[in-house]
Amino acid sequence: MMSDNKPPVRVLHYFAFPGGGIGRYVHELLTRLRDQPEVEVELACIPSYHYLKQANYPTWPGLREITHPVPLRRRLRFAINLFVNPIRAIRRARLTGAQILHLSTIPHVTFALWSRKLKKTGLRLVATAHDVRRSQGLICYPYEIEQLKRLYRACDALFVHSEYQKQDLINFAGVSPEKVHIVPHGPSYHGPPAGDKMTLRKRYGVPLDKQVALFFGDIRPNKNLDLFLQAMVPYKDRLFLVVAGQAKGRDGMGISGYIARAKELGLSENILWRCEYIPDNEVPNLFELCDWVAMPYSSRFTSQSGVLNVAMAHHRPVLVSATPTIAETLENFQVGVMVCPDSLEELGQAIARFLNVGANCFKESIESYLKRYSWEKNASTTALVYEELQRACVE
C-alpha cells in the first residue's frame, strides 16, 4: 500500500481511436486502475472516444479527431495525426506532471519525429503491444517495421497479453525479457440483455427452433468467415448464424462478397446480417439470443481476442481456432470446442458437436475462466509496473 507521504505515480494513457476491442480493453483497465491508490491515470483520447461519457477515470479528449465521413479526408486526418497526436500527448503529460506515457495505440510510423520531443521531457515510455507485428504498411512497409522495432526498444516497459506474444516481441524487436510484462484481456461485460432468449429471437427475426451461432466483431480476412460458411452447409437445417460487425481490412471480399458467397452456398435463409457498428447496449442482446460464439480464426490471427472475453462475460461457449495466443489462454479451460486453424473438416466436426451435446456442458469451465482472468488482477499488475519504473527513475 502507498504510504501517506508517498505521491502516486502519474500516468498519461494514450488512445487515439474511437473504440473497438482495444478501446474496450483501455476502458476496462482504466476503470480498475481508478481503484489503485498508488497511481493516477488520465486518458488522452479523441473527442469521439466511445466511452467518454461513461468513464469514471480522468479523461482529456484533446487529441485531434481522426474520423470523418468523407474517405479522403479521413485518410488525410489519420496521416496527419500520426504526428500531431503524439506531440499533443507529450505536451499534455508535461503540463499535468505525468511521469509515464503509456501508448495503447502505437504511432510508430512517425516515431523518428516525435521521439525527439519525448527525449527532452524525461518521460518514461510504456506501450501495450496488442498486436506485436504489422501485416501491412501505410506508405513504406520496411521503414515502418524498423520504426516499430525502434519504438519497442525505446520503451521502458512493454505489455502483451500472453507468453506467446512475449516471446514473439523479444524475437521481433530484440527487447530485454525483463521489460515485457503479461497482462491478459479480462472479461468484457456489456450489461444485462433487454429480454430472455426467446423474446430476443422473436425481436431480431431469429428462428426459435434452431441452434444459433454468433459471429461477432470486426469482419477481417483473418477471421475466416468464408470458411465457416462452408462448414455450415451440411448443418443448415439445424443451425442459424448471426453475423454482427463491420467489415475491416483492405484485402477482404467485403460484406457484399460474403452475402453473395452465402447465397452460392444456399445459406441465404440461414443468416442474419447486422454488418454495422454494434452499440454497447445491443451487445448483450446478441449474446443472449445465441447458443454459442463462432471464432474460426486463421493461423494469421496472433493477438488476444476481445470477442472471446465478451463471450465469457456473457457466459457463452465458443467454437474457436487454436491460434497461439488463444490456445495458451484456454489451455486449462474447456470453454467450448477448439479446432486447428484453417481446417474445414474440424470446423464441421465442431459444429456437429455443439448440435449434438448443446452449450450447457461448458458452464463450469466458463466460471473458472472468469475467476482466473479478472480486470482487478490486470490493474494490480499494471500499477506495480508503473511503480517499479518510477522507483527505478528516482533511484
Image: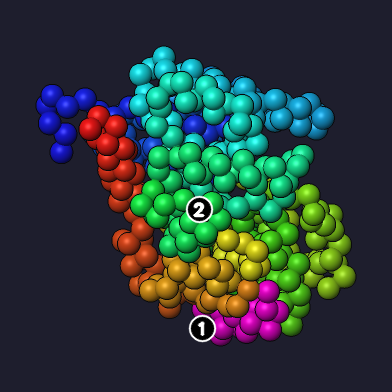
Residue stretch in magenta: 342-358
322 relative position to 33: left or right: right
**Local SS, label 1:** helix
Q: Badge 1 is on which residue?
A: 357
Dominant secondary-structure state across the stretch colored magenta: helix
Question: Residue 350 location, x and y as percent?
Answer: 59, 80
282 relative position to 370: left or right: right
Q: CA distance from mark 2 to mark 1?
A: 47 Å
Residue positioned 79% across, 54% down in the render? 251
Question: Residue 268 location, x and y as percent?
Answer: 81, 66
Q: Is residue 187 above or below residue 35?
A: below
Q: Badge 2 is on which residue?
A: 174
Residue positioned 63% across, 45% down in the render? 146
- The one nearer the camera, 340 or 70, is 340
- The one nearer the camera, 150 or 371, is 150
Residue closest to the far top: 95
121 relative position to 75: left or right: left
Q: Quadrant of the C terminus?
A: top left
Q: How many discs appear?
A: 2
- Its colouring scheme is rainbow
Mark identifier at residue 298: none
**Local SS, label 2:** loop
Q: Earlier in the sequence, mark 2 or mark 1?
A: 2
Local crowd size for mark 1, using a 10 Å CA cut-off: few (<14), some (14–19), many (≥20)? few
Residue 201 shows in the view = no
- The one nearer the camera, 110 or 341, is 110
Residue closest to the far left: 4
Residue positioned 56% across, 69% down in the render? 323
